[in-house]
Amino acid sequence: MAEPWLISNAETLTRLAEILAARGIKPPTDQEIDGYSPDEPGHPHFHRQQRITVALSRWTTATPPRYQHAAATDPTVIAWAADVIANPDNASSLLITGTTGTGKTYEAFGALKLIAAHGLKDYRLIATTTADLYGNLRPTGSAGASEQGLKRLCEIPLLLLDDLGSAKTSEWTEEITYRLINHRYNQCLPTIFTSNLPPRAATGPDLTSTLGERIASRLAEMVTVVPMAGADRRRAA
Ligand SMILES: Nc1ncnc2c1ncn2[C@@H]1O[C@H](COP(=O)(O)OP(=O)(O)OP(=O)(O)O)[C@@H](O)[C@H]1O
Ligand SMILES: [Mg+2]
């Protein structure tokens, strides 16, 4: 297994292990299969190690250099990662909100890394900002290519949709966002959203006014909201 300190801090890993143990999920021990060395095919450690290597390499490829050292620290985010590990086919989603530079994207990549480090069976992920998503799907040539791109995002086991609600909207972006979120909502596929906007605000813009009632309603049911507070870490640095 990759060295734990490359994945997260010890406190986070302990917290994750505790949550999983409470749900009856424990990593296999060396004693579980007699007659196989932990390094041989047939031993659960061997197969888990292989899954971890593949998953961490996929995470590294999908993660920009800025966030290669990301680590989840928020208890709700760690609990969400445990939920996905325990039940990847029917997991909840996460909405990390907060003002600029509070660490939303960092926390999101950290959560995806924790899941990779556990050796999830089908660890495939796409991480994109909403603006890039619209830019990549905008039909310039073949409409079929755009449909294929949307289908991939709809069906990928893990999706990070960064900066929801910050790109310029149009009827077309609303339809794309609706189709994507509606599909993942229907299929109970775990998604991490980040946004500068709160789900609802008494005054000023919020996700409901920006994305529309139908998308906001689905989000309300599918996500756990994690508000992040604090100063802009970029300026502090
Ligand atoms: N817990 C942390 N420990 C160390 N560095 C952090 C932490 N959280 C965030 N950072 C760093 O702070 C900077 C801002 O974090 P990040 O990009 O995640 O903020 P954000 O909330 O997503 O901002 P925006 O709203 O502009 O997208 C980045 O350089 C990131 O690596
Ligand atoms: Mg961000």
Image (cartoon, helix red, strand yellow):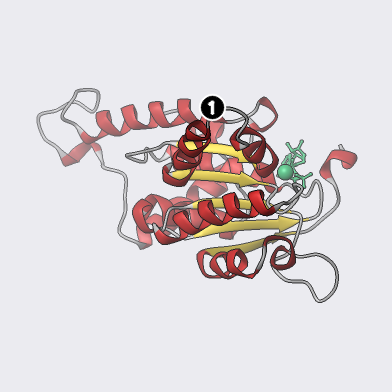
Viewer can see residue 209:
yes
237 to the left or right of 182: right
Count of numbered labels shown in the rendering:
1
140 to the left or right of 149: right
Badge 1: few (under 14), some or many (20 or more) residues near its Cα, within 10 Å?
A: some
What is the x, y in percent for residue 180?
52, 51
Q: Quadrant of ligand 1?
A: top right
Report the residue at 81% width, 64% height from top: 205
Depth check: 40 or 66 in front?
Answer: 66
What is the x, y in percent for residue 88?
37, 51
Residue 174 occupies which quadrant of the picture? Answer: bottom right
For the N terminus, the image quarter is: top left
What is the x, y in percent for residue 77?
57, 55
Report the residue at 31% width, 50% height from top: 26
Report the residue at 69% width, 67% height from top: 208
Report the residue at 81% width, 76% height from top: 202
Depth check: 36 or 50 in front?
Answer: 50
Viewer can see residue 79:
no
Q: Is 27 drawn above or below residue 212 in the view shown?
A: above
Residue 132 occupies which quadrant of the picture? Answer: top right
What amino acid type is highlighted by mark number 1? Answer: Thr
Q: Residue furthest left?
A: 35
What is the x, y in percent for residue 108?
61, 46
Q: SS class of the residue under badge 1?
A: helix
Residue beneath disc 1: 60
Q: Is 42 drawn above or below residue 201 in the view shown?
A: above
For the C terminus, the image quarter is: top right
Depth check: 180 or 37 in front?
Answer: 180
Q: Which residue lies furthest to the bottom in this view?
A: 202
80 to the left or right of 90: right
